Amino acid sequence: MTSSTLSAFLDSHAGSGTPLGRAVGLTVSHLASAAVALHGTINQGCLGNAFADSCGHAGQSGDVPKELDLLADALFIEAMRQSPVRLYASEELDEAALLDPTAPLAVALDPLDGSSNIDTNISIGTIFSILPATGDPVGERTASFLQGGGAQLAAGFFIYGPQLALVLSVGSGTRIFVFSPQDGAFIQAYADLTIPERTQEFAINMSNYRHWDEAVRLYVDDCLKGTEGPREKEFNMRWVAAVAVDAYRILIRGGVYLYPGDRRRGYGEGRLRLVYEANPIAFIIEQAGGAATDTISRILDLTPRSLHQRVPLVFGSVREVARISRYHAEPSNIAERAPLFSNRGLFRA
């Protein structure tokens, strides 16, 4: 193996000699092994048992989990049982599970991001956050996960697509490792990623346009007006319906992602979970020179109130994220910026 393997990188990270560093390295290694096993199941597609119909009960997200969701959760919790992990929390569990009272880490995880894509052969992912375990080792289990995102020791996500890829940050930049079946290892493909400050591409679910607040509609309207509008340039739009997959694209070529709260029932405070989706994505994006907010406030400055708390999420190129914040914080100034462009938007009634 060369020095560009995930194993070599984790060994180097643990080389500081701290027990916590070694614990993080071992945990990431076990997460990677579980992802390889899950990838093998995903590759079977509808030929495998894991692609059966829905299991018939709703998880914490309010969505009905599929067999593959539950299989993914089982694979990762078993991997964490073999790791220095005290507490394990996931989208599929109502409460955090106590694994090893003597271990120093807490892992929060979305086992299968983009479940709606499972049957259509579109990329899906796994998102994880690694935190220091706090408080009574056998007492209240939620406190470790109610730390601000800045307390994360590492964060990452796997992409199950044309390649099996791991996006990882341990607080010293963001890297991408791609699994090589020939070598049987994750090989570093990108080191010290940097998201361009400017972009001409945004990701949002346009079908929810009528439900958005005025600030979001105004921002999207301005993008859609292209060279004839106030932005004076053409924009492309993308939407994969899997936040990790959209994040991967933004890391590679720039862009901005928006999943705002809206007026639909249950969507007022956003849809993505702060602890095991927004926080790890924000950590990774910031380590690549980008920004992440809840439309106004920095995600990593938020203190979670509950394990499954939802939050609006905007992330990507710094200048574009800042612009979106201005649309929310100073809507009257934005609306009056140029009377020429104050006409109704393309999708307005």
Image: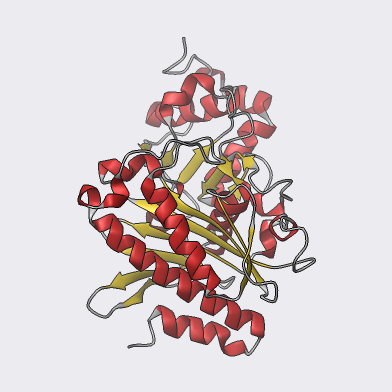
Q: Position of residue 188 (x, y in %)?
A: 37, 75
In the image as oriented, which residue stretches furthest toward the top? 349
Quarter the N terminus occupies: bottom left
Tell me which residue sits at (52%, 79%) in the image: 26
The answer to whether 283 appears left or right of 5 in the picture is right
Viewer-proximal residue, 325 or 176? 176
Above-or-below relation of 41 to 207: below
In the image as oriented, which residue stretches furthest toward the left? 47
Viewer-proximal residue, 115 or 76? 76
Q: How many marks?
A: 0
Viewer-proximal residue, 106 or 152? 106
Task: Evaluate whether residue 337 shows in this view.
Answer: no
Above-or-below relation of 232 to 77: above
Q: How is the image coloured?
A: secondary structure
Tell me which residue sits at (40%, 55%) in the image: 71
Above-or-below relation of 272 to 169: above
Quadrant of res 154: bottom right
Tell me which residue sits at (54%, 39%) in the image: 61
Q: Position of residue 279 (x, y in %)?
A: 60, 54
The answer to whether 337 appears left or right of 343 in the picture is right
Quadrant of res 270: top right
Tell me which residue sits at (70%, 68%) in the image: 133
Quadrant of res 99: bottom right
Viewer-proximal residue, 344 or 64? 64
Q: Position of residue 79 (x, y in %)?
A: 48, 69
Q: Position of residue 156 (x, y in %)?
A: 50, 63
Task: Evaluate whether residue 3 shows in this view.
Answer: yes
